[in-house]
Image (cartoon, coloured by chain):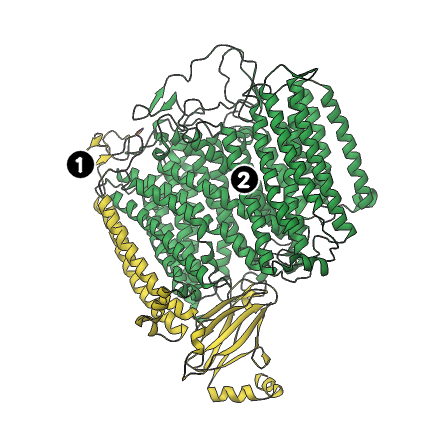
Amino acid sequence: MMTPGSALLRHAAFAQVSRTPADVFDNLYLVFLVLGTLVGVVVISYTVYNAYKYRASDPDAEGRYDVEETPPEEDGDGVARPQVGEIPTGSGKGGGKKLFVSFTISAVIVLGLIVYAYSLFLYVEDTNQLYDGEDTEDPLEIQVVAEQFRFTYVYPDGTTTEELRIPKDRPILVNVTSQDVMHNFGIRELRVKADAIPNQYNEAWFQAEETGTYEAICYELCGVGHSSMRGEEVIVMEPEEFNDWYDSSEAEKAEVSG
Amino acid sequence: MGENGHLPPKSNIKRWLVTTNHKDIGVLYLITSMFFLVMAGILALLIRAQMWAPGATVLDPGGYYQVATSHGFLMVFWFLSPFAFGFANYVVPLQIGADDLAFPRLNAMSYWLYLFSGVLFGISFFQGATFMGGWTMYAPLNAPAFIPNYGHVGSFAAILALVMFTGSVTIGSVNFLTTIYRMRAEGLRMRDIPLFSMSILLTVWMMLFAFAALLGALVILSSDHLLHTSYFADVDGNPSSGGSLLWTHLFWFFGHPEVYIVFFPALGAMAEIVQTFSGRRLVGRKWFVIAMALVAIQSFIVWMHHMFLTTINLPIKTIMMVTTIGISLPFDLMVFALIYTMIKGRVRWKTPFLFVLGALLIFIVGGITGVFLGAIVLDYSFRGTYWVVAHFHYVMASGAVALIGALYYWYPKITGKMYNEFLGKIHFVVAFVGFNLLYFPMFVVWETPRRMFEYSAGFTFWHRVASVGAVLFAASFVIMIYNLFMSLYSDRVVDDSPWAYTGSTEWAVPSPPPTENFPGTPSFTSGSLRFLEGPEATDGGVEGEEATPDGGQVTAAADHGEPHPDHASWWPVFAGSSALLAGIGLSGLSPSMFVWPFLFALPAFVYFVGAVGARRDGFTVLHGAFLSASFLLLAVFIALFHVTQGIITGLESAPTYFWLALAGAVLGVYTLVRLGFESFYVPEPTSSAQWPFGEVENTKLGMWTFLGSDIILFGAFIGSYVFTRFEFGWQDWWHVAHEVGGLEHHPVWPGLLNTYILLASSFTVVLALVFARRGVGTTEIGPLSVENRKLTLGFIGTTFLGACLFLLNKGIEWVDLYFHQGWTFNADIMSSTFYLTTGLHAAHVVIGMMLMLFLMVRSYTGAYQGEDEARTIEYFGLYWHFVDIVWLFLFPLFYIL
């Protein structure tokens, strides 16, 4: 579903800043963290401040209640106070305007954040763009098959391994499924994650910018062996190195993986 | 007056077994749920012990997953909601000016089903291993093929415990809805009810529908366990085409409203406590209520945000993101309303207020971190990590913290004694510090995968901080329990209200309130609460027998015109314990054996209806017929048992589970019969505010709301069928059943014939009602003059016969499909959906037939003659029409399309 509005969002300037899903996540997480902390600190301080400022400490002379009740309806502050046996009502007009102003502010912040986040989401979700680039390689498509309690990787040429070897700087499009129960395939640092559901094929893409070894983790409880369904099995290689490996024979691959 | 109409004193253990009084049951709920809090809390400490260092250091993997799963189940189901409903039971009738709940015995039954479902869950630990697939029970890990053999019985027992719990919740929801709509003090409009009652009203609306969906999911899951259907996976471990996704839909359709179900009562309590301890009425009360109602409705259209990483498509993800963000905004308004209420208040930092303030702060953090999850890109990375764990504990446990505040707030009302304020404050400080030490580090090391005890060594420090926090948090409750227990024996006696600026009605009566709650009939017609002298003037006459809303009978006390309401019955506790026995039995029975205990209970039911009816109304020829028929039926079932199992070999090999199930089923039907015949007087409200249901009686409204939840139950089944068929390929469905499943022919005519039979039976039940309404007398039919009661009996009997024909026809069809064509339950997904969905309908028919047997015996002795008395038949008619209407949907779905 690419409505004109969402297409516009996707091409908006701020959506183009980031490239890999990991970059997108890092940027967005930072924005949310800063704003969230700010809002949290302000609201919490304001709450505690008011609870403290309007504290009452005068004890009840007769000792009947926890505090002396001022005469019904009106006291010094012009505030109508609750009385036992009244038909419950609100506080009248007091505070209503303030309520709506703060509600509107919070709504604007939340909606703004979400529109921004949605534009980035459309970017991450759109796997067709991976094939658009003129000066970039098409993504490497790899099928990930989860089972209790390991992942298997199937390359376009049929190579099947238990290690995920990928070239850096090239988009990787994984197609995730499961042979038994529901799993979830994820690589923490590369910010890729997809549910592995039996008889369903779930797409996700990512791109590594550094060579190295990463951990593939199952993020869905999948049985008694779940906690050990993680391993340092994702190997990001220099493109040439990867091509050498990929072009080598089955036997040689097995030897490398040995 | 029932033989147990009067309550023994509180010091007598019998009182707590027989009581139907809402205040007693509230106390029982509170104490029981605290017990489950301790149990689930100990499990949480085990989790934190395991997380002290990476790896299986304390528990083995199977043990850890049992502990983690049970912790979730117990906290969400057996602690949070029941704890809130302890207050709801105690406080809501007081707040709205009702003497009790609408159906006191059903209320007691809710409690006993709750307690015994928890006992069944506890027992499941000792049946090999309890369920270990997480509280979300994702499929197909929840199917028997993927549960280790040693865990089969215990896991199924845990599922059955949830089914029982769902029953308790449904009965409770019907009860509270009827009470709040029909039994408010005069002059108290719906919009006027206090905020806690308002939150309970919205909670039970959500419960009614959400738990029906859960029940649907659980029954389907149970069928995969017991009948070996293949909704989620077949017995060989092949996952079905759409089962995994189907479960996530069913579960989260329940699961998301459930979040608000556990949080709303806390929100209502927060509003009450902030008002009292600020000495101000709530700012923007109207908007607060509107916001809550919006959330309650919207809670049913956000569930797929729990499934952003499944294969749902972009448009659906977008819609769910929008509804999710939309549902967060009303909460902003509610939080601000609570904060602004404190301004210009006279805020007292008493223990209840401290807890509510703490809960508010915790909830703010939970809310903000929830917005993070609403951004799908972030959700992708947070999925399955401790961010989610930390977030929902900040939300759910903030509800728990608020309810602890409610416990301190209403403790003096319930016990008549004031707790120790100093210890209360200590409890708060330790709990608040412990809570944040426990959960905030989880945000810091949020990259830890959830439900995994392996984690990066670098995270160890923060997990240890969390474990220390857990110990502190747990310890704080020791202080609370000590405080509340010792305070019972203190001399800090309180009168009506120990707090200044209370408003709602519970504070206008003594602490604790007397059994009848109010000194007179409460009324708000003058603008504020007054107690009117004596209810309606007595009409003096002795009525003999009159129908009660419970369908039972009452003999008016001979000395006064006004009979006293009954407050005691043994049958609810028996109902709960027989469900427990049946549940334990069922958990360990094989597909070939499980049905027999319940079949053998049917003749027992017929016998009890005849025997108990004869004792109650005097022996008639119909009672005799029932007694003889029961033996005949028993002989038939024994013969059938012999043919399929062989009596000697069958009974010799019958496990203990068989006898437990038999005992549970027979005790269960006996209990139901006794409940039906018990005279238990509950006055129908006469001078209450009843908008918008002034024109219907309590029992009819109860029946309506019950059928509302039943619609969702069938909706879950029909939805599952449609979903599964779409995933499989709509057009291929029957072809594959024929080609692969071995189904030779699947004729339409048995379904068509049954459609006609059911429609006709709907007509005859209406005729039964017509003649019952005519009262005592005779009706001329041609040359014959027939007594109306016999016509009533005749038409109920005709309806019963129709139901028999329906089942007979279905039986012939099933025997052909199952035995002759070999199209068994597990032949393919088509047979699974066909047998289970139409089987659920058939179960409804059987329950209807049991009700009709009861009605037949009663109508023969003239129990339903007259406009008011005939209502019982009308209520049954509603149920029966509903069952017929359901068939009108099932017939085209399973026979034509």
Pick whichever, B430 or B302, lies toward us. Answer: B302
Main secondary structure along the magenta-highlighted residues:
loop
| Amino acid beneath label 1 | Gly
Q: Is residue B213 above or below residue B4?
A: below
Q: In this view, does B236 lie above or below B157?
A: below
Chain at numbered mark 1: A
Query: Residue A78 has which mark?
Result: 1
Secondary structure, mark 1, is loop
Using the rendered view, name the quadrant where residue B848 is placed: top right
Q: Using a 10 Å C-alpha cutoff, classify the residue at mark 2 as few (fewer than 14 neighbours), some (14 to 19) or many (20 or more).
A: many
Coordinates of residue B894 in the picture (x, y in percent): 64, 49
Query: Residue B168 has which mark?
Result: 2
Chain at numbered mark 2: B
Pick whichever, B581 or B55, lies toward us. Answer: B581
Locate the C terminus of chain A and report the quarter of the image it occupies: bottom right
B81 relative to B424 in the view: left or right: right
Q: Which residue is drawn at 52% across and 50% down?
A: B73
